[in-house]
Image (cartoon, rainbow, N blue to C red):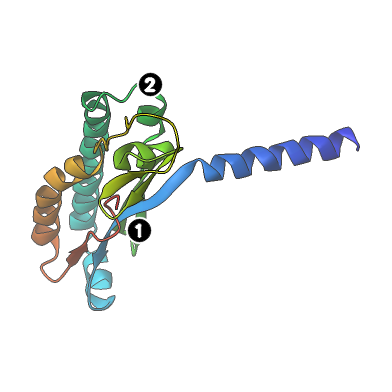
Amino acid sequence: MSPAKRLLQSRSNLRSAFARSWEGPFDIDIREEGITHRYERSMDTQALEEFNSKIKSWGSRVKAALPPSISSQGIEGIQLSRSIKNRYKFDYGEISRIGYAFARHGVFVHKGVGRGYRAQGDTVVKTAKTQGFNRKPKPWFNPVIESFIPELEQIIKEYADSAVLNTVRIFIR
């Protein structure tokens, strides 16, 4: 195999490994009946910029609150804290979706599952044949999000009365 092919293959392997190391999407969707209201609001650029800046500051505060939650649960290491990223999707210049991505093992830690343990409903079931049962859920993500949702609802209500906040996909289940 030529050096160029080897380099190309190693880069593609890195990308696929990186893509698999992220879990998600964990996002909040801001919905409306139609796009007409969103388009009309986009004409008021000052209000639009203020709304987007409020949403971004809310997202930054949530992102800043997650690492202390991780350490308070006794989760060791800094890899999970460093992997937290927030993302925004825009429609007509307006933020329509707020998402969070983090390392895949964050979901396993949150649920208390992993090698030899799996989730069955809301409980952890041991599948390994070794002695002892030492896995417990460490909910580091959902409580932080739940505490910040009312503030986000208020921001959206001030900007658009007809918008609805869809939080179905934000929580780790």
98 to 69, vertically: above or below: below
Q: Is any atom of residue 43 visible in this view?
A: no
Q: CA distance from mark 2 to mark 1?
A: 34 Å
Q: Which residue is mark 1?
A: 90
Extreme residue toward the right, this view: 1
137 to 25, vertically: above or below: above
Q: Amino acid at mark 1?
A: Phe
Q: How many marks?
A: 2
Q: Give me the residue at 21% from left, 67% from top.
A: 41
Which corner quadrant holds the N terminus?
top right
Q: Could you say which disc has been placed on residue 72 in the image?
A: none
Quarter of the view holding residue 35: bottom left
Q: Amino acid at mark 2?
A: Gly
Q: Residues within 10 Å of mark 2 (few under 14, many from 20)?
A: few
Q: Give me the residue at 43% from left, 46% from top.
A: 23
Q: Earlier in the sequence, mark 2 or mark 1?
A: 2
Q: Is any atom of residue 112 visible in this view?
A: yes
Point out residue 135 in the picture as x, y percentages from the top left corner. 32, 33
Quarter of the view holding residue 130: top left
Circle 1 SS class? strand
Question: In the shown orientation, is residue 153 left or right of residue 43?
Answer: left
Between 171 and 44, the residue placed more toward the observer is: 171
Q: Which residue is mark 2?
A: 77
Between 136 and 7, the residue placed more toward the observer is: 136
Question: In the shown orientation, is residue 122 left or right of residue 161?
Answer: right
Circle 2 SS class? loop
Mark 2 vs mark 1, foreground winner is 2
